[in-house]
Amino acid sequence: MRVALFVTCVNDAVYPATAVATVTLLERLGVEVDFPPGQTCCGQAQFNTGYRRETEPLVRRMGAVFEGYDHVVTPSGSCAAMVRENYPRIARKAAAEGRGTELGGIAGSLVPRVYELSEFLVDVLGVTDVGAYFPHTVTYHPSCHGLRTLGLGERPRRLLEAVKGLELRELPGAEECCGFGGTFALKNPAVSAAMGTDKADSALTTGAEVLCGADSSCLMHLGGILRRRGDPLRPLHLAEILASTEAEPHP
Amino acid sequence: MSGTFVGMPAFPEAAREAVGNSTLRANLRHATHTIRDKRARAVAELADWQQLREAGKQIKNHTLRHLDRYLVQLEESVVRAGGTVHWAADADEANRIVADLVKATGEREVVKVKSMATQEIGLNEALVAEGISAYETDLAELIVQLGHDRPSHILVPAIHRNRGEIRDIFREEMGSWGRPAPDGLTDSPAELAEAARLHLREKFLRAKVGVSGANFMVAETGTLVVFESEGNGRMCLTLPETLISVVGIEKVIPTWRDLEVFLQTLPRSSTAERMNPYTSMWTGTTDGDGPSVFHLVLLDNGRTDTLADEVGRQALRCIRCSACLNVCPVYERAGGHAYGSVYPGPIGAILSPQLRGTASEIDASLPYASSLCGACYEVCPVAIDIPEVLVHLRERVADRGGKGHRLEKAAMKAASWAMDRPAVLAAAERAATRTRRLHPKKVPGTGAWTAGRELPELPEKSFRDWWKGEGR
């Protein structure tokens, strides 16, 4: 089984610890992971802001970089959703405009091979207990693209519930958007911050120590709000919790 | 659409103001959460909800694909049943047709059934300009009209008002429009409803002309259908001598049988009820029963242009249930007025820029008034993929290169250029992380982010450098 890690541009540049944790976790589960260095970004920000044609070279790059791998795993629900939902759309529109006939093949080949981390663990590896140890109270925020576009359902929660020492606390209004939304956070800052503040407030009512998510950009937004207010709740990616063990606990 | 909203600021500015209004936010939060919870329960009762949703989508898609044929069939059916059909290309034409029809009766006032189409074209204002008073009879529309306000929700136009505000509006304004509010009116719902009932009854019994829209028009029989909850609609549809209905061309459905689907999905999605209290249907005119004169004004006003767009046309499936507004986290904070249109919320964000075009600042900003969370798509009873249309319209706005988009386009192009060159990306990451101790707390150009949040601290090295360092 040839497995490639797609770390996403945000994790690569801003949250490398999440990507390192993903590697640690997968290797502990016996998966040989490769990181093709030609990878960059899935093009989600450009696509969602209205610059679809600018994403075409990135679709080509993703196709070339991950060619030949059985599975492409990413610790980001929204980047997985970008490939699965929007690459076929980009290909269809390009073809309709008389360009890039190869994009359809690239999308068709990538879509069934791209997995969000929790999907890969539960569906491909067939594990829910990954042997993790994390003695803290945790509340989980299911990000919109993971929840609605990918339909991750209970997978992340089942993984968390199996972590030794972890106490999972229900997040009230869990399915509501945190307000990040890519460039939405910059184009509509007032509404975005109001949504994030409400989400942070409901996470605080759980009394948990850790706010867990499977999308670093949502955590960046919520973490920025929590830090601005000095709230006692730390954001942490699902991969980092799952990578934590008794021998090597998360710092 | 209505001229009422011309000169509106773009969505982000209008929304910022609403976000700062704590009473408005509390009113909106309470109302949207109550109705979204009730709706979820009402929908959960139906085991075949997803099939009904798919059926609604298919019926609407089929009708839109053959719209020309069904509209001609509708016209023939309405005429056969004794009605008259008028075709209006835009708001001005529709308003002129209605004003002329009212003037021909010699009347100077009309009673109105709540209708989005007549609001869209600004009919009330156009009639006032012709010396005709148009009285809204839906309770919430009455509150909005008496308050010299604008509707802020498709189904609950006065959602932004609480009981105390409504009492004050009734006390101060009812007298100048007709029967005044009773002395000592309190803010109890029963007393407010009774005051409205007495005020409106006087108008129902006096009116000779009624104006309505319609939720559906059945092509095979020429029947128009209105769903409502208060009975005011039935009064307006039966008591006057002349009835004028202004309806968007996309409201046609082929057969009576098709109604079966929407009779189930519309009430549950909009008011969270199994069945709406009043469903009124009328087919032309009948001697001795109801209005003796019936006019149907078929309104285009940007709809055929919308139909021409392969992705955007799905917005025409909308049955105006407002479920998307009630689950939208952006609508919940920004309120309906910020959308600058009679169609607020997610559906407004895709409908208004298509019906009106994206030339104005407000219309160009609407496709961005969403975090693309997808809650609207999930609840839509005719499965309109609102996030897909939003992104599609963003492309249209970005292509026009309006205010702010030229710079953005350059930035996006630069980003795509760098992202297509891993070495450039790696070098940029390295430069940023090496200088991270020197970065000012407020990095220039990040104001929109740092107004409400901290920036993340950059790591010592990027993942790709870590990977390389591990010697893999």
Image (tube, grey):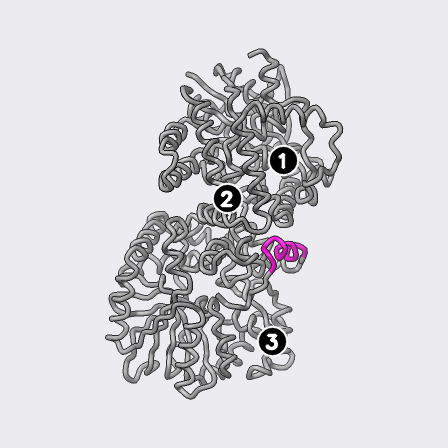
Label 3 amino acid?
Phe
Using residue A19 as the reference point, say whether residue B435 is left or right of it.
right
Q: Give me the C-alpha separation between circle 3 and circle 2.
A: 46 Å
Tag on residue B315? Answer: none
Residue carrying label 2: A50
Determine the chain carrying the residue at label 2: A
Q: Position of residue B321 (x, y in %)?
A: 44, 59
Q: Nearer the viewer, mark 3 or mark 2?
A: 2
Label 2 amino acid?
Gly
Q: Nearer the viewer, mark 2 or mark 1?
A: 2
Same-chain check, marks 3 and 2: no
Query: Dot 2: what SS?
Result: loop
Tag on residue A220? Answer: 1
Query: Dot 3: what SS?
Result: helix
Q: Give me the C-alpha separation between circle 2 and circle 1.
A: 23 Å
Determine the chain carrying the residue at label 1: A
Q: Position of residue A186 (x, y in %)?
A: 62, 44
Residue A107 seen anywhere in this rendered image of the structure: yes
Residue B232 seen anywhere in this rendered image of the structure: no
Residue carrying label 3: B170
The range drawn in magenta is B9-20
